Amino acid sequence: MLSLLNRIFRPKEPGDTPPSTEPMVNWDDLETEDVYVERIARRIATSVGRLKSNGAFSVNPVPYLEKYVVGHQDDLLDTIYSAGLARRLALSETLRDQYGNLAHVQTLLLGYIDIGVHVNNLCISTWHGTGSNQSRLSAITQIHARALLIADEIFCLLVNGFPSGAQALCRTLYELSIIAKTLANSPGVISRRYQRTHVVEIWNAVKDERALRLDFIEPKSDSAWRDAEKAFNRVVRQYGKEMRETYGWAAPLFATRDNARKRQVKFSDLDSRFGDAERRWRYQNASHFVHGAHLGTVKSVGFDGRGSLTVGPRPVGFAEPATDCLWDLHEIEEVLLRVAQRTAQSAEPLYWLEVQTLAVASMHLFVNDSAGIETLDEFHNQRSF
């Protein structure tokens, strides 16, 4: 009998029709996940038991393991694939519940994003303005476009039951909101400096790649290296050596009488000036899901009733990242449209802001209603060992 995967992905023969990318699965015939895992465990135990008296196996088991995998690869892949199908089936009810919790929010968000894309197009055409206002609007429009994409990604994770990953992305969205506020409240030259930072980041990446002798990964011609270096040097000559730092573009905002340029600007400097205490606290909490701190593990993984570690989607924990996402996304939207209003000298951007405010307020209400299912017991089981 051919392997299930061989049937799906077998090589195409002359005159053959392309294989289906979706196998015909009889879901009723599937066993539970544990059955398939136990099947592999028995095969491993049988092989180890047969070879444990072999001295060569004890010294170096690798050749025997390779022979085992080659000899059983069809059965192993069939079993792994069946375990995956069984897991999909087992999780389907959880995903169905989670979709029910967030369906209205996600649908409104898609409409919000659609309008946001239209607003972006107006910003780079009808409302683009001139001079410093144009520089601000151009930079914030790009930030806004990225924010729409990240919000879509966050809700994709939430609808599929992954609030920890969503919370990690919320951290990025918060950083974008602080940068957007910084640019909106600063001279146009700060926006121009910000828009040249990618040149510095590209040069730092290719320079490190060569220094670590990793340039074989993506070979570049000598002219490409020289072009990257020349672009970097132009940015430094035009805006100063502080541009070499991650937040060097904001250095003029922190100049003092004694120091023409703050030596090194950090994100916390921008956050202290343009953020607020509650959002900063949420940002710090989101960091637990980004870094390798053990608290991030405690908050993401739990024990089931049998004492086993559990991973995978869950229909709880979505209210906080959903709220954070909507909050920061709309703050960026508001910053953009208020800058557009000043730039275009027109009330039209404010009308679009009111429309989007109505949408986001309704989304917050839907999230709050759905959050009622998140009981304290569920939170405790999900967030502590």
Image (cartoon, rainbow, N blue to C red):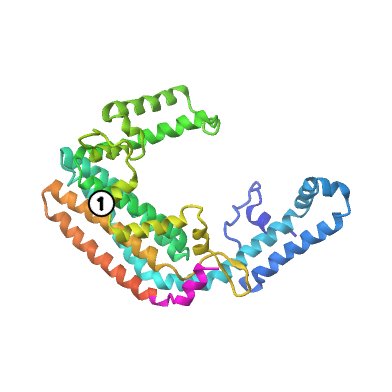
Disc 1 residue type (three-letter): Phe
Residue at 19% x, 62% y: name it: 354
Residue at 51% x, 69% y: name it: 382
> Is residue 110 in view?
no
Which sits in the foreground, 93 or 290?
290
Residue at 66% x, 51% y: name it: 10
| 385 horizontally vs 31: left or right | left
Q: Which residue is mark 1?
A: 274
Rendered view: 67 above or below 167? above
Rendered view: 367 above or below 154? below
**Could you tell me residue 333's position as x and y percent?**
25, 55
**Could you tell me residue 317's position as x and y percent?**
44, 68
Which sits in the foreground, 345 or 5?
345
Q: Is residue 202 magenta?
A: no
List the single residue furthest toward the front.
Answer: 258
| 385 horizontally vs 350: left or right | right
Q: Is residue 383 magenta?
A: yes
Residue at 65% x, 68% y: name it: 33
Chain part drawn in magenta: 372-385
- In the figure, residue 189 lies in which quadrant? top left
**Could you tell me residue 48's position as x and y percent?**
81, 57
Magenta segment main secondary structure? helix
Which sits in the foreground, 36 or 195?
195
- Helix, strand or loop for disc 1: helix
**Could you tell me residue 268's position as x and y percent?**
33, 48
| 98 horizontally vs 238: left or right | right
Rendered view: 64 above or below 320? above
- Neighbor class of circle 1 (other Cα within 10 Å; few <14, some 14-19, many 20+) is some
Query: Which quarter of the image is occupied by the C terminus?
Result: bottom right
Query: Which quarter of the image is occupied by the N terminus?
Result: bottom right
> Is residue 352 in view?
yes
